[in-house]
Amino acid sequence: MEEEKLTEKEWKAKKKKKSPIGCIVIVLIIAVFLFIVNNTGLSDNDKTSRSKSSHLELSKSQLEAITDLVDNGSLKINYNLNEAFIDPIVWHGIDYQTKENFCRTLAIYCGNKKGTKLYWVDIKDNNTGKKLAKYSNSLGFKIY
């Protein structure tokens, strides 16, 4: 009788766990997005040669990658408040440089959506709302 209860508890615990395949798909989408960002993002020379008031544009592939992340539920963007809510599994699965490039891309996305030349964004955990990082074209990148 006790073995049946343990088995039932284990079964329920397994049922509640997220599918590892779903997480793998999300990580792969982020990897593609980050590859695009790293290959089309601004180099250090480009950042210093542009004035802070210049208009920045994202490539079509960067916009498509953002759309894919939003569509699969890994990313929610409130560009009016310069906020992006990301799945913490995805956030913790990427390295520092990739996070910075990702945040820079989202800052440009928010600034362009609002029609301003102010490029900044706060990145938050989509489960808890806790601030994970921020990026500003003028102040740089910070992880919390």
Image (cartoon, rainbow, N blue to C red):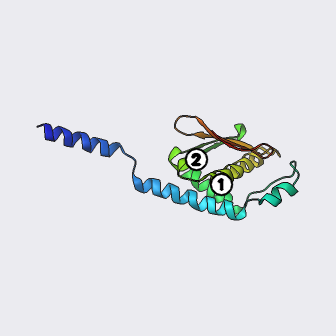
Quadrant in the rendering for residue 41:
bottom right
Left or right of residue 103, residue 95 in this image: left
The percent coordinates of residue 143 (x first, y second) are: 64, 42
Q: Which of 126 and 143 is in front in this view?
A: 143
Residue appearing at x 84%, y 52% in the figure: 55
Instruction: Determine crowd level at label 1: few under 14, some 14-19, many 20+ residues with C-alpha closer than 10 A.
Output: few
Residue appearing at x 87%, y 48% in the figure: 53
Residue tagged 2: 75
Q: Do the residues labelled 1 and 2 touch (CB within 8 Å)?
A: no
Secondary structure beneath label 1: helix
Alpha carbon separation for disc pair 1 and 2:
19 Å
Q: In which quarter of the image is the C terminus?
A: top right
Q: Is residue 12 visible?
A: yes
Instruction: Determine crowd level at label 2: few under 14, some 14-19, many 20+ residues with C-alpha closer than 10 A.
Output: many
The percent coordinates of residue 8 (x first, y second) are: 21, 41
First in sequence: mark 1 vs mark 2: 2
Secondary structure beneath label 2: strand
Quadrant in the rendering for residue 12:
top left
Residue appearing at x 77%, y 60% in the figure: 43
Q: Which mark is residue 97?
A: 1
Left or right of residue 3, residue 71 in this image: right
